[in-house]
Image: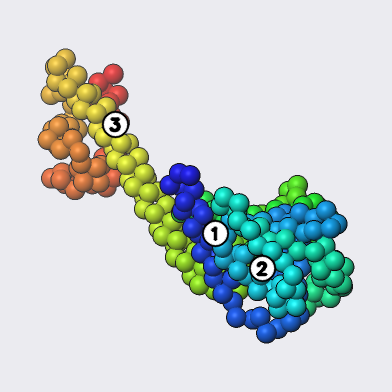
Amino acid sequence: MGHKGEKYMSFSSEIKKELSELNNLGKKEEVKYELLGYFFSDNILNDEKKVKFSTESEYNINRFSKLLRNMSIDDFNIEIQGKIYIITLEYSQYKNIVYGNNDEFLKKEELFKSFIRGLFLGSGSINNPNNNYHLEIKMPDNKWINIIVGNLKNYGINVKSMDKSIYIKDGEEISKFLAFIGAGKSVLDFEEIRVQRHMNNKVNRLVNCQTANLNKVLNASVEQINAIKRLKENGNFNKMDKSLQELAELRLEHPDSSLVELGAMLKKPIGKSGVNYRMKRIIELAK
């Protein structure tokens, strides 16, 4: 996996590490609905005999097994295949959690937060925010997506959906989402990167703007100098008004100066618009 991928993994992993260490396992209802979130995620496979949850995250597997034990589900098996951890449990235990719930958790904030936390831990990911803002949670089908999106909006978090997934591409909304599921430290890290990115973009815009302005000044200066040289070559320079001659000589001596600076150097200083008018006269005469 490339450098970008490693960074991306590490930011997602940092969040999952923080969430896996949350100390709320004493609250049975919250534990139940966090587990329900895992069961609703895309990384669950069930064949109505066994249920499997697979993940690359050791933090995830620790959290998931803690939640199971907390719900008095001790009969499960953990195995490792390559980089993937797999927890297998009996379908009946899964069924008790999934079908033994009502929609109460959609109305109670703490329970809904727990559910969304489990869902994110189960199949959520977030890009390295240094590159772009993208948080996504994949789901096995679209059945619950509209309900989840609508409910998150009720809590002031703007989430979008596409086929079998919900996602956020706005930095501020991602911050709100992470705070909602209890990843306070990750919010601070994310915001720090956001501020840095904003500052970098601002500096880049400023530099680009200054470069564009400088190019404009230099292009205009080149046109003016060429006109003055033509006037000198065809003998029309001395026929010009003395005020135009004075400005023309200053331009030749100061090719990098702005019109404002040239105006200030004249024996009788004039403003930018006055200098601009005289320069246009010089260019017209050269034509």
What coloring was used for the rendering? rainbow
Position of the C terminus, as image quadrant, is top left
Q: Residue at x 70, y 59 (%)?
A: 53
Residues under numbered marks 2 and 3 in contact, where contact means CB atoms less than 8 Å apart: no
Question: Residue 252 lies in what quarter of the image?
Answer: top left
Q: Amino acid at mark 2?
A: Phe
Q: Nearer the viewer, residue 7 or 43?
A: 43
- The location of residue 80, given as percent across then percent down, is 60, 56
Residue labelled with disc 1: 12
Which residue is farthest top?
234
Q: Residue at x 84, y 58 (%)?
A: 49
Residues under numbered marks 3 and 1 in contact, where contact means CB atoms less than 8 Å apart: no
Residue 134 in sight in this render: no
Tag in front: 2 or 1: 2
Is 167 placed above or below 102 here?
Answer: above
Position of 256 compared to 171: left or right?
left
Tag in front: 2 or 3: 2
Residue 257 in sight in this render: yes
Residue labelled with disc 2: 64
User: How many C-alpha atoms fall within 10 Å of the one at disc 3: few (<14), some, or many (≥20)?
Assistant: few
Question: Residue 199 lies in what quarter of the image?
Answer: bottom left
- The location of residue 8, given as percent across then percent down, is 50, 53
Q: Amino acid at mark 1?
A: Ser
Distance (Cα) linking label 3 and label 1: 49 Å
Position of 235 compared to 220: left or right?
left
Q: Residue at x 60, y 69 (%)?
A: 62
User: How many C-alpha atoms fall within 10 Å of the one at disc 2: few (<14), some, or many (≥20)?
Assistant: many
Labelled disc at residue 28: none
Residue labelled with disc 3: 219
